[in-house]
């Protein structure tokens, strides 16, 4: 599996590409989206100091079949739309990559944060190009599996500890009981589990920090 962030240039002529480019200080956040055949339906949160002009531009664009204003404030609005130009959604659907929402569109560019197999991501880039979209890769990071993080012996030890309820709340067994079950000295078991826990927690903390920094 790989974690990646793509910045996609939306193709000219599309409603979201043209409207977001015409109002570059506005943020268009897609909260929900569903592609169906040659059209798409979505829920869009808009933040803009030119809200009236933005909404008018959306309503009047040829790529919009229907738009409904659900909520409106001074600088924020929530709209549901139907479009005949769901090119980004179609590219994601065709490549079988899970779309992680929300996603932001600003100034004609969409920011996609994705987790998928490298083969799927490669197919996505092909689909983007076929739909006339260029892109930049902001980062690409491999996500190691538990088998890659731990040695076979460590994996087996962790599995045994889990099976005996050592990590349950409350614990299903004490460290002493687990050591007796595994025929290990208590100090040896404690040291090995500590190393395993440290490896797993550091990987988790690193992944969480990366997500928060996006």
Image (cartoon, rainbow, N blue to C red):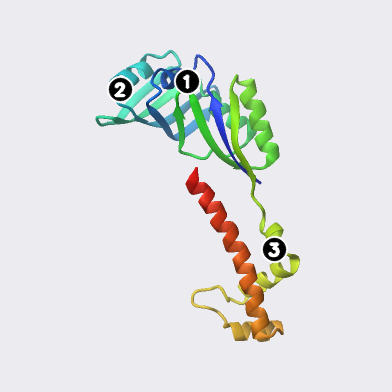
Nearest the camera: 22 or 40?
Answer: 22
> How far is the residue under mark 1 from the one under mark 3?
45 Å
Vertical order, 117 against 10 (above or below): below
**Label for residue 50?**
2
Determine the secondary structure under disc 3: loop
Where residue 153 appears, as percent x and y from the top left, is 74, 70
Q: Residues within 10 Å of mark 1 (few under 14, many from 20)?
A: some
**Label for residue 150?**
3
Q: Do residues under tags 1 and 3 come within 8 Å of each other at their CB atoms?
A: no
Query: Which residue matches tag 1?
Result: 17
Task: Quadrant for residue 8, please give it.
Answer: top right
Query: Of the residues under marks 2 and 1, which one precedes in the sequence?
Result: 1
Q: Residues within 10 Å of mark 2 (few under 14, many from 20)?
A: some
Vertical order, 8 against 149 (above or below): above
Residue at x-position 67% and y-position 86%: 180
Residue at x-position 32% and y-position 17%: 56
Task: Quadrant for residue 126, please give it.
Answer: top right
């Amino acid at each position: 599996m790989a974690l990646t962030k793509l910045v996609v240039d939306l193709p000219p002529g599309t409603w979201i590409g043209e409207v977001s480019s015409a109002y570059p200080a506005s943020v268009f956040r897609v909260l929900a989206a569903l592609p169906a055949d040659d059209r798409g339906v979505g829920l869009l949160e808009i933040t803009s100091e030119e809200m009236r002009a933005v909404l008018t531009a959306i309503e009047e664009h040829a790529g919009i079949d229907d738009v409904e204003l659900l909520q409106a404030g001074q600088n924020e609005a929530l709209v549901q739309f139907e479009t005949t130009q769901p090119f980004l959604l179609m590219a994601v659907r065709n490549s079988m990559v899970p779309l992680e929402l929300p996603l932001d569109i600003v100034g004609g560019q969409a920011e996609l944060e994705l987790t998928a197999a490298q083969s799927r991501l490669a197919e996505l880039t092909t689909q983007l190009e076929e739909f006339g979209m260029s892109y930049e890769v902001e980062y690409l990071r491999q996500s190691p599996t538990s088998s890659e993080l731990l040695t076979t012996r460590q994996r087996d030890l962790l599995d045994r500890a889990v099976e005996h309820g050592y990590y349950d709340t409350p614990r299903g067994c004490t460290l002493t009981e687990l050591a007796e079950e595994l025929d290990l000295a208590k100090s040896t078991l404690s040291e090995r589990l500590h190393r395993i826990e440290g490896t797993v927690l550091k990987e988790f903390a690193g992944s969480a920090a990366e997500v928060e920094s996006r």
